[in-house]
Amino acid sequence: MVLLVCFGKRGYGLMAHNLAFSIKHHNPNIKVGLWIDDALCKQLPDRSLFDDIRILNESDYRDDKGKIDPAKAKTQIYRLGSQMADKFLYLDVDGICLGDLQPLFDSLNGLQIATEVIAKGGKSDKIEYSIWSTNDNIWKFFELPDSATLCAIQSSWAYFEKCEMTDRMQAWLDYYMEVGIPRWMLSQIWGGTLPDELVYQGVYAKLGIIPNYDGRVVFFGNSRAKETAEEVRVKYKVLSLYGNGGNTTRTLTVEKWLNMHDSLLKEYGAKPLFKAREVMQDKHANSRN
């Protein structure tokens, strides 16, 4: 099963629609599960794209002040997904599927926990993409042994299997979300809220989990990306609309990849067609606090 989670503004429901449509286009037999807030559920263009739809409680994605806090939901991905399936692939909704996902499921089978690991290292190392806090603060707050390995992850996708290790992971994620990550330890914030990647990094390091996957899943089309459109379609499974978007002139995903997203939807026969600029206008990353 592929798990999608969305809440908040209209654009997230449209992104979930586009992604589910593209997944089913390539393989209609793959089941897609959706956790969604009640208001967005009522606005879904086509519920038939989803094999299992469940409604989030507001406490699953809002903080004590009623503000949307994506980390509250994203640190519950395993809990949510394991209510639908014993094995599942989580995908952020801001993307479009590039091919049949079944070979990816087959290659992930048995890994228990896998995600995008950008880099890894020890306490004294400079770890690429470990951008949310300093090593000293991470080691101190998560009470890591000096010998721990920290994995800098990109959490746009993750694979989980129901087992003792993932149960322990969820318990520690719950603990740190309950304790709270102090603002002073953050080197930067994400859309004004806590980056879920920092919590996962700390818990993985604490449990000695190295969630590597030897393959490419999500393509992030930033200004440094050198691949051609054809190479992206061959090498990756999902084209991401990551980062900010909407009507902003500068986006992390550069224009040619936004155009590719729209062209693929047309190629797949999407009707109605919700274009990248439209669906990205409600993204959490547009917020700045």
Image (cartoon, rainbow, N blue to C red):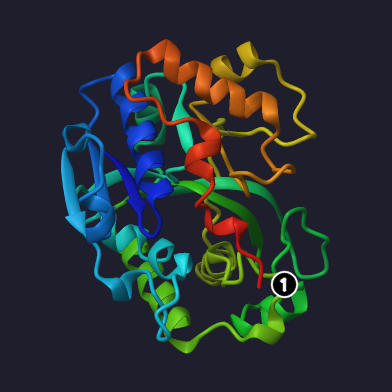
Q: Image height check: is 34 above or below 171?
A: above
| Residue 109 occupies quadrant | top left
Name the residue: 18% across, 38% down. Answer: 47
In the shown orientation, is residue 220 left or right of residue 17? right
Number of marks present in the image shown: 1
* Amino acid type, mark 1: Ser
Residue 110 coordinates in the image, percent (x, y): 35, 41
Q: Image height check: is 177 above or below 28?
A: below
Q: Residue furthest front?
A: 247
Residue 21 coordinates in the image, percent (x, y): 32, 27
Name the residue: 20% across, 47% down. Answer: 85
Residue 28 coordinates in the image, percent (x, y): 23, 21
> Is residue 83 at least partly visible in the picture?
no
Is 52 or 104 nearer to us in this picture?
A: 52
Name the residue: 74% across, 43% down. Answer: 250
| Circle 1 Cα neighbour tier, 10 Å, few/some/many (<14 / 14–19 / ≥20) | some
> Is residue 251 at least partly visible in the picture?
yes
**Quadrant in which the C terminus appears:** bottom right
Is 94 or 119 nearer to us in this picture?
A: 94
Is 175 or 98 nearer to us in this picture?
A: 98
Say which element carries label 1. Answer: loop
In the shown orientation, is residue 131 left or right of residue 197? right
In the shown orientation, is residue 81 left or right of residue 246? left
| Residue 77 occupies quadrant | bottom left
Residue 49 coordinates in the image, percent (x, y): 22, 32
**Quadrant in which the N terminus appears:** top left
Name the residue: 53% across, 65% down. Answer: 196
Residue pointed to by mark 1: 133
Q: Image height check: is 32 above or below 122?
A: above
Q: Image height check: is 10 above or below 51?
A: below
